Amino acid sequence: MTLSEKNPMAVAHILIWMVLVLLSSRISVSNATATDIACLKSIKASLVDPNNYLNTTWDFNNNTEGFICRFLGVECWHPDENRVLNIRLSDLGLKGQFPLGIKQCTSLTGLDLSHNKLYGSFPANISKFIPYVTSLDLSFNNFSGEIPSNLANCSFLNDLRLDNNRLTGKIPLEFGLLERIKVFTVTNNLLTGPVPTFNHYNIPAASYANNLDLCGKPLSECPGVAEKSKVGVIAAAAAGGITFTSIIVGIFLYFLSRGVAKKKAEDPEGNRWAKSIKGTKGIKVSMFENSVSKMRLSDLMKATNDFSNNNIIGAGRTGPMYKAVISDGCILMVKRLQDSQRLEKEFVSEMKTLGNVKHRNLVPLLGYCVAKRERFLVYKFMENGTLYDKLHPVEPEIRNMDWSMRLKIAIGTARSLAWLHHNCNPRIIHRNISSKCILLDNDFEPKLSDFGLARLMNPVDTHLSTFVNGEFGDLGYVAPEYLRTLVATPKGDVYSFGVVLLELITGEKPTHVANAPESFKGSLVEWIRQLSEGPLLRTSIDKTLLGNGFDDELNQFLKVACNCVVENAKERPTMFEVHQLLRTIGERYYFTTEDDITLPTDAGDTDFPDELIVADATTK
């Protein structure tokens, strides 16, 4: 006998219960649908979408169940429910500020807005907008301001990426209490101060690279490290679940944050280190050129507003670069070397050598200064900034580089590198070529910057991995053999320069190719190699250059670039050969007059003398 025959009333009760459950579930889904639809509408309305990705794919006139789950970049809990689980809008060219409407996506666990053009500061109470996220990627944008400590309240975070922005101030120490964090990166920002102590996972030093002045494990020790170690012990105990200690830590961090806020109010620019050398005003700046006015440290302090963060025009591996306006109206660039291991006597000796390294396509090194433990280099100011900024501006529509200008820059830079490799005494391997270390003067004449810095920073084992090829850790510039051997060679420079040539002719970034298929995740070189295997290589050329009467020059230029980045280092040309090839392409433009590059008889890769300087370029 069936249940319906035995007890029809029980069956009726079960059916009624099932209907109620389904109705309540439908109500829940409906509520989620309304809020999530409002969330996506708000995001679409708040962001500028110049490529019409959202405008064409986010159609809110559709009323079918789960329709928003088919939107570009939207992932749902289930295809038949409009409850948004992840939003992934990477590399769409979106502009605007952090979308506050995202708060209405109440089930959101993943947010990826990386590789866009978003700007402004993060909401101070950001955890209220994304309380349940496990993955947050806001990298490769133009976000500025401080990282809100409130983000530490997102206790489910596993993956937090804030790299390649313009973030300032300190990294909140409260991040050390995020028990689930596995990936954390803030590279290529303008951050200062101690880094958090993560108790459950080891965050590598590379995650903090290319900031202004970070310290603490796994980086160099901070001043007063003994006191900071106590903070780490307390944080570790809190993470272990000791309730009483957690309360103590909360109180301590509260007063610590108030103290930090007070110090920030007193010193908003974060340049307290500069105040420690104010008592050394009598120190002279050693100048190499008589045409430059005699200066003292006090003049540099005044010219940079006490090395204010507002005067920073670039930040690299070895330290920030400041714009200095001297009282007589002269404009200079001053690099502060951070963590230089050279003693004063050794440093001065090295500077005397580098001061004699002069070429028309090298950024003129005008002088240097030693004040206590600080080391400063003084350079001539370059009015048009870096090649990288000209090729990849924040607003792509303002890029204005015609073919003759790009060819002129390529030839001039090749001339400087060939001179460093073959004619300079001592000969120099640059080791860190990128479009960010090629500066442009008032006439857009290229000037290669910061040669010799690796030698200044570390007097021993300069061939080792202290400095990795590629400004700001861009692996797109790194020669493959360097990753295997950690030995810098002239052919490694040729490879890196070849990547710059590819940037010039394609307009693409070395590690992020906008015109490649969405599924492609490789570097610019890898993309070019894929295209070269078929008839599509020509499609990589910047479309603004084609059809203007110099297509043959473009094809020759692209061939030179491809030869520079071949896998086998021995098959690459020397910089002397690269320079000669580029000069031939640009003969009709009369860029060069008398050539100053000659090929010595000992120009092989392994014939560099013992006194070779291995250089590092870090100007942004």
Image (tube, rainbow, N blue to C red):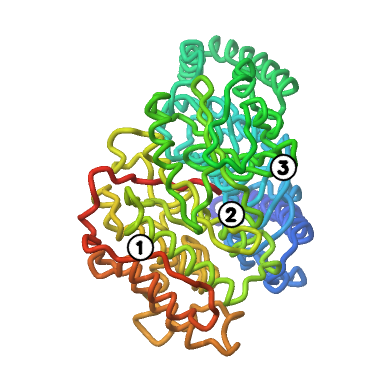
Name the residue located 63 percent from the left edge and 59 percent from the top edge. 81
Q: Which residue is mark 3?
A: 121
**Horizontal side of residue 416 vs 402, given as left or right:** left
Residue 494 is tagged as 1
x, y percentage for residue 541?
51, 79
Type of amino acid at the residue the image marks with label 2: Ser
x 54%, y 61%: residue: 446
Where residue 602 appears, as percent x and y from the top left, is 21, 60
Q: Amino acid at mark 3?
A: Ser
Mark 2 or mark 3: name the one nearer the start of the chain: 2
Q: Secondary structure at mark 2?
A: loop
Q: Which residue is labeled 2 in the image? A: 114
Q: In the rendered view, does 372 fall on the left or right side of 565?
A: right
| Residue 298 in view | yes
Along the line of sight, the residue nearer the viewer: 156 or 162: 162
Q: Is residue 546 above or below residue 180?
A: below
Query: Given the image, on which type of amino acid does mark 1 rest?
Result: Val
Between 518 and 178, which is closer to the camera in this rendering? Answer: 518
Q: Secondary structure at mark 1?
A: helix
- Residues at badges 2 and 3 in contact (C-beta under 8 Å)? no
Q: Nearer the viewer, residue 201 or 452?
A: 452
Q: Which mark is residue 418?
A: none
- The alpha-carbon separation of the residues under discs 1 and 2 comes to 31 Å
